[in-house]
Image: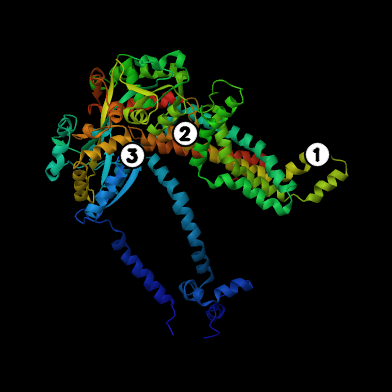
C-alpha cells in the first residue's frame, strides 16, 4: 500500500509522530527498513534501543567484558582451575603488590618512561604538526600528512625491528659513524634507556600528531595576522594565541601517548636493556612464568590500569581546565 | 511478488536461529574424529616438507599454531579444560611433570605406533619419561643450557665464571630464570632443587644467594632475553660476545658458519628433551598417533628437525644423514656430555615458585 508509512502506522496507534530529517525519513520509510527494524519494533523508543544495541554490545563485550573478567580473576585464589579444583574469593593478590617493595620499581619506572616519552613526543611533534597545519599549502597538506603517516602503516613489531637494525652494534647508525671515521668501535646504543626512549617516541608519535594537527588547523589565521599587526612577535603569538587555542589537542595527544606508552609490552622486551624492565613485563611474568599466578597478574594489571587512568584524569583536569570531563 | 518479511517472520527466523545455535556451535565429542590435526609447537620444529607430505599421504589437514613459551601452552590447556582446541603440544623437559600432574596430557600407547622402534633406544623408555607407569609423549629433540661465545673475542672458556669477567662488561646475555639455576650450580648449590625437597629454608637461602650474585653483576648484562631468536640476533649484530644459550639456537648459528662455539663448562649444566604430546581429551587423538608414527618413519625427518632447530634429534640413524658440519654443530666432546644432568621432575612447585620470584627481583633491581 503506497501510503503505508511508518509515520501513518505510528499515528494510527495514537503515538507521537517522530520528526525525522528528510534523509532519515527516506531511510525509515524505505521497504528494507520497514520490513526489518521497523517491523520488529514499532515504537520510537524500541527503535532507539535496537539502534543503540550494536554499539552497546560492542562496548560491553569487547571493552568492559575483558576488564570485568580480569577483575574477577584478580579476586580468585587460583586460576586457571585444574580438574576438581575450587577457588575462593580473596584480596591477597592485591596485597602482594603492597607487601613486596620490589614491584614498586617497575611501576615507577613505567611512569617515568611514559611521562618522559609523552613530554618528548609533544616537544618533537608539535613543530611538525604546526608546520603541516599552518605552513604547508592547503593543497599539499593531505600529501604531507600521508607522508608522515606512512611508517605507521607497518605494524609495531616491524617498526621495532627497524629500530634494532638502526641501533645495533652492526646497525646502520654505527656503520655510518664508523665509515665517516668518527668512531673506531661501535657505540652500544641498543638495549639501553636511550634505545627504549627513542623507540617509544617513534612508535607513539602518531597519537600526538593527529590531535595536535587537528587543534592547530582550527586556529583562525586572522587571529595570528591581527596579533602580528598589533606588534606581537612570533614568541608572543605562540604563547598568547597558538598554545592556548591548541590546548585541547595537547591534552588529547598527551593522554593518548601516556596511556599507550605505559601499557606497551613488546617494544621494551625487544629493545630495552637490563635496567629498563617495565611493569607490563613484570605482569606478564605472572601469566607465563613456571609458577603460573594469573590472579596476581590480573590484580597487578588492574592496579596499573587504575593508576594510569587516575594520572591521565588529573593531568586532563590540571591542563585541560575545569571544563574538561575526566571520563 | 515475493512475500514481504514482516515482524512475525523476522521473529520466527530469530527464534529458529537461537534454537539452532547450540547444535551449530557445540564442540564435537572425542569420538567424532575429523580429517584435521591441530598442533601447538615451536617455530622450526616440524619441517614443512614433512607436514606437506603427511597431509598428502593421509588427507589429514594439519594446522600448526606456533608458541615460544611453555607457560602459554600450559595456560591455554588449563583454561580450555575438557574442550581443548589443540590435539598436540610440545612440552619441554622442565615442565613435563607439571603438564602431567595437571591432567593436561594423555599417556602414549606405544602399541599404536609401529615405528616406535625407530626412536633412539636411550629415549624409548627413559627414566625421566616414565611417570606414573606411563610414557606421555614422543621425545623429538634434545638440548642443554650451554655457554656460547663469539670465538673472535672470547677464547675457549672453561668455567661459567667468564660470564662475570669484568672484561666482558655489558657484553653478556641470558634468560634470567634459566641462568639462575646455573648460577646456583656455579655457586655450589643445587640448581634443580632435587635435594631441597622438604627443605624450603635451605632452598630459599641458595636461591637468594644466586639472586644477589646476579644483581651484583647486573652491569655485565647487555640484555635479558626470552627467545632463542633474540640471542641469535645479538650474536650476529655483535651486541654480545658471550651468552648462556639453549644448545639449539647456538648450534644453528655454528651450522650457518658464524664464529660461535658452544660448550658445557666444568661446573656442569642442565639438559632437557622436547616431547610431542597428545592432549587429554584431544578431539583428533587417532590422527595424532598417525602423525607420531610418520615422524618416526624416516631418519630424514629427524635430520630436518635438527637442521632447522639446531637441537639434537632423538631418532635413531639421524647422525648418518647429517653432514659433517651439521654433526659437529650438534655434538659435544664426551667429557662435556657427562657434565649434563637432565632436569628432574622432583620438587617442581618449590623450584618454580622460588625461581620465578627471584627472576622478578633480578629484573626489578
Whole-percent x, y for residue A94 in the image: 42, 34
Identify the image's colour scheme: rainbow, by chain, secondary structure or one colour.
rainbow
**Residue at image mark 3:** B44
Residue at mark 2: chain: A
Q: Residue at x 68, y 42 (%)?
A: A128
> Position of A225 compared to B126: left or right?
right
Q: Residue at x 56, y 73 (%)?
A: A27
Place residue B186 in its image quadrant: top left
For residue B101, above or below residue A16: above
Q: Are marks 3 and 2 on the same chain?
A: no
Secondary structure state at the residue bearing disc 3:
loop
Q: Which label is found at residue B165?
A: none
Q: Which label is found at residue A270?
A: 2
Q: Earlier in the sequence, mark 1 or mark 2?
A: 1
Q: CA distance from mark 3 to mark 2?
A: 21 Å
Q: CA distance from mark 1 to mark 2?
A: 42 Å
Q: Nearer the viewer, residue A171 or B133?
A: A171
Residue at mark 1: chain: A
> Position of A237 compared to A128: left or right?
right
> Position of A113 compared to B325: left or right?
right
Amino acid at each position: 500500500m503506497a501510503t503505508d508509512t511508518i509515520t501513518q502506522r505510528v499515528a494510527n496507534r495514537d503515538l507521537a509522530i517522530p520528526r525525522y530529517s528528510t534523509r532519515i525519513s527516506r531511510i525509515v520509510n524505505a521497504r528494507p527498513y520497514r520490513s526489518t527494524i521497523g517491523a520488529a519494533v514499532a515504537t520510537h523508543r524500541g527503535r532507539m534501543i535496537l539502534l543503540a544495541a550494536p554499539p552497546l554490545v560492542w562496548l560491553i563485550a569487547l571493552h568492559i567484558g575483558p576488564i570485568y573478567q580480569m577483575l574477577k580473576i584478580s579476586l580468585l585464589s587460583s586460576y586457571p582451575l585444574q580438574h576438581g579444583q575450587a577457588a575462593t574469593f580473596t584480596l591477597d593478590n592485591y596485597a602482594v603488590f603492597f607487601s613486596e617493595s620490589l614491584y614498586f620499581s617497575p611501576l615507577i619506572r613505567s611512569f617515568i618512561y611514559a611521562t618522559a616519552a609523552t613530554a618528548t613526543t609533544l616537544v618533537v611533534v608539535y613543530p611538525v604538526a604546526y608546520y603541516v597545519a599552518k605552513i604547508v599549502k592547503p593543497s599539499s597538506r593531505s600529501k604531507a600528512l600521508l607522508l608522515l603517516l606512512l611508517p605507521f602503516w607497518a605494524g609495531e613489531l616491524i617498526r621495532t625491528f627497524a629500530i634494532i637494525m638502526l641501533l645495533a652494534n652492526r646497525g646502520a647508525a654505527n656503520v655510518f659513524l664508523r665509515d665517516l671515521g668518527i668512531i673506531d668501535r661501535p657505540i652500544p646504543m641498543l638495549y639501553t634507556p636511550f634505545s627504549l626512549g627513542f623507540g617509544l617516541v617513534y612508535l607513539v608519535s602518531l597519537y600526538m600528531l593527529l590531535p595536535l594537527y587537528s587543534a592547530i588547523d582550527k586556529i583562525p589565521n586572522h587571529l595570528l595576522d591581527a596579533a602580528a599587526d598589533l606588534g606581537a612577535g612570533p614568541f608572543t603569538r605562540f604563547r598568547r594565541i597558538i598554545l592556548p587555542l591548541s590546548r585541547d589537542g595537547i591534552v588529547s595527544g598527551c593522554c593518548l601517548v601516556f596511556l599507550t606508552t605505559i601499557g606497551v609490552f613488546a617494544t621494551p622486551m625487544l629493545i630495552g636493556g637490563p635496567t629498563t624492565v617495565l611493569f607490563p613485563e613484570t605482569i606478564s611474568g605472572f601469566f607465563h612464568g613456571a609458577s603460573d599466578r594469573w590472579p596476581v597478574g590480573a590484580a597487578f594489571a588492574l592496579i596499573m590500569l587504575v593508576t594510569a587512568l587516575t594520572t591521565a584524569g588529573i593531568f586532563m583536569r590540571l591542563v585541560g581546565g575545569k571544563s574538561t570531563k575526566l571520563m | 511478488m515475493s512475500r514481504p518479511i514482516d515482524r512475525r517472520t523476522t521473529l520466527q527466523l530469530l527464534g529458529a536461529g537461537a534454537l539452532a545455535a547450540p547444535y551449530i556451535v557445540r564442540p564435537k565429542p572425542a569420538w567424532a574424529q575429523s580429517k584435521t590435526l591441530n598442533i601447538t609447537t615451536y617455530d622450526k620444529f616440524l619441517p614443512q616438507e614433512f607436514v606437506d607430505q603427511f597431509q598428502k599421504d593421509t588427507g589429514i589437514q594439519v594446522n600448526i599454531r606456533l608458541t615460544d613459551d611453555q607457560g602459554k601452552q600450559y595456560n591455554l590447556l588449563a583454561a580450555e579444560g575438557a574442550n581443548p582446541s589443540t590435539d598436540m603440544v610440545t612440552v619441554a623437559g622442565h615442565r613435563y611433570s607439571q603438564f602431567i600432574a595437571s591432567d593436561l596430557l594423555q599417556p602414549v600407547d606405544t602399541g599404536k605406533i609401529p615405528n616406535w622402534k625407530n626412536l633412539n633406544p636411550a629415549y624409548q623408555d627413559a627414566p625421566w619419561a616414565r611417570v606414573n607407569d606411563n610414557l606421555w609423549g614422543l621425545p623429538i629433540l634434545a638440548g642443554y643450557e650451554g655457554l656460547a661465545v663469539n670465538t673472535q673475542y672470547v677464547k675457549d672458556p672453561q668455567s661459567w665464571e667468564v660470564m662475570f669477567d669484568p672484561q666482558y662488561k655489558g657484553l653478556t646475555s641470558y634468560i634470567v630464570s634459566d641462568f639462575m639455576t646455573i648460577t646456583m650450580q656455579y655457586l655450589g648449590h643445587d640448581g634443580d632443587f632435587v635435594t631441597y625437597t622438604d627443605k624450603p629454608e635451605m632452598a630459599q637461602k641458595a636461591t637468594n644467594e644466586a639472586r644477589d650474585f646476579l644483581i651484583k653483576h647486573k652491569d655485565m648484562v647487555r640484555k635479558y632475553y626470552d627467545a632463542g631468536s633474540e640471542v641469535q640476533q645479538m650474536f650476529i649484530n655483535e651486541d654480545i660476545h658471550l651468552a648462556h644459550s639453549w644448545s639449539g639456537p647456538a648450534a644453528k648459528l655454528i651450522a650457518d658458519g658464524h664464529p660461535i662455539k658452544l660448550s658445557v663448562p666444568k661446573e656442569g649444566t642442565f639438559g632437557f628433551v622436547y616431547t610431542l604430546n597428545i592432549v587429554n581429551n584431544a578431539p583428533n587423538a587417532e590422527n595424532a598417533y598417525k602423525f607420531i608414527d610418520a615422524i618416526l618413519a624416516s631418519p630424514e625427518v629427524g635430520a630436518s628437525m635438527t637442521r632447522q632447530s639446531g637441537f639434537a634429534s632423538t631418532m635413531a640413524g639421524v647422525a648418518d644423514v647429517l653432514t659433517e658440519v651439521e654433526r659437529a654443530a650438534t655434538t659435544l666432546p664426551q667429557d662435556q656430555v657427562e657434565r649434563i644432568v637432565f632436569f628432574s621432575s622432583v620438587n617442581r612447585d618449590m623450584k618454580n615458585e622460588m625461581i620465578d620470584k627471584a627472576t622478578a627481583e633480578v629484573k626489578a633491581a
